[in-house]
């Protein structure tokens, strides 16, 4: 996660609430060699997606000020698979705001996104993201830009913004840009802030249609950390932006 950016780890997840459509498709078909090289047809199951995302390397020197905590592969795969089942990934233009080392954008591309733009203010994080994408044989557009300065529209936004532990409400610019960018957003937040986040989403003209909860494991990666791993309750919200002229 990065602030203002234009392995299988244990986790628990509740079913998305409400699940309007059951997840019945067992695999995704895409024309991509997931291990690099040529093009061919391949089935990608959810477990395979998680295994591939475990190959995504994390930031070697994360910044506490930017709250650069990597999204665990298991959680990323769970959310991406759910987003795919909702029709929000395949053949879509997807943007990852504050992409870090690229796990969400890479996963979207593996699930058949037509175009993925991953942006961050941290060039060192983007360098790792580029290497991760190359290693997994996917094409990403990587941009060094502040989220407030990103102008392009998209179909879907994926993001794991800073939770605001170091800088209160650091996630708000991400929410504002996400709803301005795409009609659908998938976003992670500290579970304690969910009521506030929902109110802000409504004020921005959005509605939280689904939620999933996780125990987000934060490893000992900052000087002030005292525990080897600390589980933080996290909520993922799927947000739809109101369509102009539709009541």
Image (cartoon, rainbow, N blue to C red):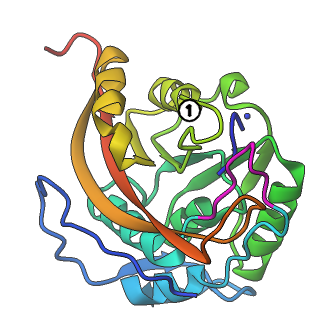
Q: Position of residue 203 (x, y in %)?
A: 33, 15
Instruction: Classify 142 as above or below 50.
Output: above
**Mark 1 residue element:** helix
Quadrant containing the C terminus in the rendered view: top left
Q: Is residue 12 left or right of residue 218?
A: left
Q: Residue at x 37, y 38 (%)?
A: 193
Instruction: Classify 175 as above or below 46.
Output: above
For the stretch drawn in magenta, the main secondary structure is loop
Instruction: Classify 59 as above or below 40.
Output: above
Residue 48 in view of the camera? yes
Would you call the spot at circle 1 few (<14 residues within 10 Å), some (14-19), or many (20 or more)?
many
Residue 45 in view of the camera? no
Q: Which residue is mark 1?
A: 174
Instruction: Classify 101 as above or below 121.
Output: below
Task: Give, as a single range, the part of the protein colored magenta.
Answer: 62-70
Q: Position of residue 1 (x, y in %)?
A: 64, 52
Please tell me in which quadrant of the rendered image residue 17 appears.
bottom left
Q: Residue at x 66, y 45 (%)?
A: 98
Q: Position of residue 96 (x, y in %)?
A: 59, 48
Q: Residue pushed farthest front?
A: 226
Seen from the viewer's position, the closer of residues 74 and 85 is 74
Q: Is residue 172 left or right of residue 144?
A: left
Seen from the viewer's position, the closer of residues 182 and 33 is 182
């Amino acid at each position: 996660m990065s602030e203002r950016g234009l392995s299988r780890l244990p986790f628990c997840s509740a079913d998305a609430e409400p699940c309007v459509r059951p997840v019945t498709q067992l695999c995704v078909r895409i024309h991509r060699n997931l291990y690099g090289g040529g093009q061919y047809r391949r089935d990608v199951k959810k477990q395979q997606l998680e295994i591939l995302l475990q190959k995504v390397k994390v930031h070697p020197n994360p910044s506490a000020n930017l709250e650069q905590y990597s999204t665990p592969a298991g959680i990323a795969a769970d959310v991406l698979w759910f987003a795919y089942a909702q029709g929000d990934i395949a053949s879509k233009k997807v943007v990852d705001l504050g992409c870090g080392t690229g796990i969400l954008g890479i996963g979207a591309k593996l699930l058949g996104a037509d175009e993925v733009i991953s942006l961050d203010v941290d060039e060192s994080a983007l360098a790792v993201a580029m290497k991760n994408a190359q290693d997994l044989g996917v094409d990403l557009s990587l941009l060094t830009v502040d989220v407030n300065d990103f102008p392009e529209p998209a179909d879907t936004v994926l993001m794991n913004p800073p939770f605001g532990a170091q800088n209160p409400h650091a996630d708000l610019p991400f929410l504002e840009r996400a709803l301005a960018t795409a009609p659908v957003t998938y976003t992670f937040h500290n579970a304690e802030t969910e009521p506030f986040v929902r109110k802000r989403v409504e004020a921005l003209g959005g509605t939280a249609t689904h939620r999933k909860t996780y125990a987000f494991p934060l490893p000992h990666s900052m000087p002030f950390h005292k525990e080897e791993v600390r589980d933080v309750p996290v909520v993922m919200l799927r947000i739809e932006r109101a369509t102009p002229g539709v009541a």
